[in-house]
Image (tube, rainbow, N blue to C red):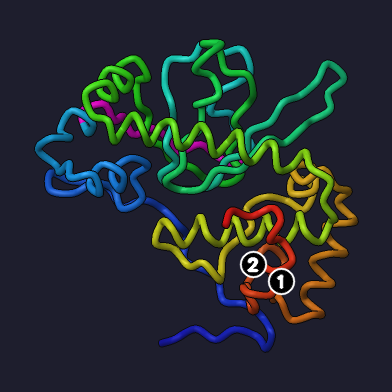
Amino acid sequence: MQSKHPAGRLPDPPSPIADDGDEARFCGTCAFSSACIAAGYHKPELAALQCLVEHVGPFRAGEHIFRTGDPFRAIFAVRGGTVKTRMVDKDGREQVLGFYLPGEVIGLNAIYPEHFPCDAVALDTTFFCRFSFPAMSALASRIPAVQQHLFRMLSKELGTASLLAGDHSADERVAAFLMDLASRYEARGFSGTRFHLSMSRGDIANYLRLAAETVSRVLSRFRIQKLIQIEGRELQVLDPKGLRAIGQALLPE
């Protein structure tokens, strides 16, 4: 029997989680398989990649996947759940650096210092594929598609940081943030119009360099303008074109 929802309430979206890979296919949200298969590599050629994978988790909300200063030995691909990365200064002030969804990789910013320069904290129940980075580097040197994909992920993180440093309005930042989440979910085969905001308003505000009250006001304004529907942390994008138009300056072409 189909469940009913009170009037005006959004139904719960499906919880995004990667499907386990098997001998014939990769996980549905594998951080590497789409690039490799598109380049003509298939399961036999990438058996070594699967052998590198160690499934770890679950990590519960608030638990650390790694901490600032931990030795860098592996990168983590999110299988399910959401993660935030952050830095905490000597006075205990937090700066949110980013959010990571299923199929995305955390830990790449530790390659050069060989120690993690930030914390990674689970926002809900999360699972990971852990890849030994020395072994991954050796594989990348043999499979150009894997190497190129690593470079793309690094450049994307750098590009996001530079955009957030620009002089943009609160509406532009929030609209771009929502559309970026939507496109990232959609790219992994999940709904790009209806999803759960695992992060708090405070975390969103911190990441966007805004006050939490400002983020709440912008979301309320977007709801009144019928750009979105939101209840608690359940969000539906009603007018993707309208949101994209507002956040265009912060979004890729």
Q: Residue furthest front?
A: 253
Identified at 54% across, 39% down, the residue is 156
Q: Label 2's element? A: strand
Q: Is residue 201 left or right of residue 102?
A: right
Q: Amino acid at mark 1?
A: Glu
> Tag 1: Cα neighbours inside 10 Å, few (<14), some, or many (≥20)?
few
Question: Which residue lies under the disc numbered 2?
Answer: 234
Q: Which mark is residue 231?
A: 1
Q: What percent of the width, then of the height, locates residue 172? A: 77, 59
Q: Amino acid at mark 2?
A: Glu
Residue 129's image quarter? top left
- As rendered, which of 200 and 167 lies closer to the eye? 167
Identified at 41% across, 87% down, the residue is 1
Residue 218's image quarter? bottom right
Is there a contact, CB below 8 Å, between mark 2 and mark 1? yes
- As rendered, which of 85 and 60 lies closer to the eye? 85
The image shows a total of numbered marks equal to 2
Alpha-carbon span between mark 2 and mark 1: 5 Å
Q: What percent of the width, then of the height, locates residue 53? A: 29, 30
> Tag 2: Cα neighbours inside 10 Å, few (<14), some, or many (≥20)?
some
Identified at 23% across, 31% down, the residue is 49
Q: What percent of the width, then of the height, locates residue 110? A: 54, 19
- As rendered, which of 234 and 139 lies closer to the eye? 139
Q: Label 1's element? A: strand
Q: Is residue 246 magenta?
A: no
Q: Is residue 88 left or right of residue 117?
A: right
The magenta segment is 51-61
